Structures are given as structure tokens and as C-alpha cells.
């Protein structure tokens, strides 16, 4: 087998693995609610400044991107991201920006970043939090403390 074929095979395997463990972010709360109702899951709405907010970036790196959190979230949460990037290259579509602005007007009037809101499938707010210096297990426990 040539080096190119081996390299290509490794790349494909890694790409497929990253897709398996990729966080499934919803970008529309109505669609997320429908999914949560159909799958009997909790909604986790995340307000983020992905390219300027240091605690948001840490939360992404330390928690959301961890294999442990991703695996748990896949079975228990519907994850919704309302991102507010500032850099031109990360600019959202006008439609997505409008959706995120409407979410902020309803759920994040103080403009906190990051803001993590735990909701039931009927959009009842169960708790709010932000960045915490916790392990993925600790953060899962923290989010679950709002449930019940």
C-alpha cells in the first residue's frame, strides 16, 4: 500500500471518529424543543462569544469538546448554541444573527457570556450557570443539579 493511500486511510478514519464525537449543536430553539420533546431530553442553551470571550473559549475547549461530555450530551441533552462572534470571518448569516438576537432578548437580557441555561422540554428554565473550572464529569453533575 502506498504512503498516500495509508495517509488517506488514516485521515478518513480520524475524520469519521471526529464526526462520531462531534457535538450536535442545534441553532434553532424551536427545532431543539421539538427534538427534546420527541426524545425526552433536557435542553442546554448556550450563549457564547466564540471568538472573543475567554471563558466561552475555555468552556468550549474544556467541556463541550471533551469526549466525555459529548457522549453524555448525545444521550441526555439537546444542545443549542446562540453564538455572538465579533470577527468578520466568523460572521453569522443575517437569519441566524436574528434568531440569536431574539434568544438574547428573551433569555439573556443582561448580556452574560458565557451563559448556560438548562431547560426542560417545555422551555421551563431549570437553572442558569456559566463557566466553572470543573472537569467534564463535574460540569455534567453541575448541569444535572438543576434537574429534579
Image (cartoon, rainbow, N blue to C red):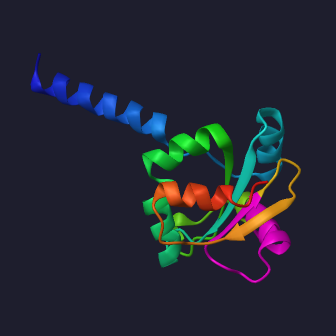
Query: Which is nearer the eye, 41 or 115?
Result: 41
Q: How many marks?
A: 0
- The reply, left or right, for residue 144 in relation to residue 65 is right
Q: Residue at x 45, y 69 (%)?
A: 58
Residue 123 in magenta stretch = no
Counting from the top left corner in percent of width and height, residue 94 is at 72, 62
Corner quadrant of residue 39: top right
Would you place residue 78 above or below residue 12 in this image?
below
Residue farthest along the top direction in this orientation: 1
Q: Residue at x 79, y 44 (%)?
A: 31
- The reply, left or right, for residue 114 in relation to residue 99 is left
Q: Residue at x 66, y 42 (%)?
A: 76
Any part of residue 19 in sight = yes
Q: Which residues are magenta?
A: 99-118
The quadrant in which the N terminus is found is: top left
Would you place residue 55 above or below residue 93 in this image?
below
Residue farthest along the left direction in this orientation: 2
Amino acid at each position: 500500500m502506498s504512503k498516500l493511500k495509508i495517509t488517506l486511510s488514516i485521515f478518513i478514519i480520524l475524520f469519521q471518529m471526529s464526526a462520531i464525537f462531534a457535538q450536535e449543536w442545534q441553532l434553532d430553539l424551536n427545532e431543539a424543543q421539538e427534538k427534546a420533546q420527541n426524545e425526552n431530553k433536557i435542553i442546554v442553551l448556550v450563549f457564547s462569544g466564540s471568538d472573543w470571550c475567554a471563558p466561552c473559549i475555555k468552556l468550549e475547549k474544556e467541556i463541550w469538546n471533551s469526549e466525555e461530555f459529548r457522549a453524555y450530551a448525545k444521550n441526555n441533552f439537546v444542545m443549542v448554541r446562540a453564538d455572538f462572534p465579533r470577527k468578520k470571518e466568523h460572521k453569522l448569516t443575517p437569519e441566524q444573527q436574528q434568531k440569536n438576537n431574539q434568544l438574547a432578548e428573551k433569555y439573556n437580557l443582561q448580556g452574560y457570556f458565557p451563559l448556560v441555561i438548562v431547560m426542560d422540554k417545555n422551555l421551563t428554565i431549570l437553572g442558569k450557570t456559566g463557566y466553572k473550572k470543573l472537569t467534564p464529569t463535574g460540569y455534567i453533575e453541575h448541569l444535572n443539579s438543576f434537574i429534579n
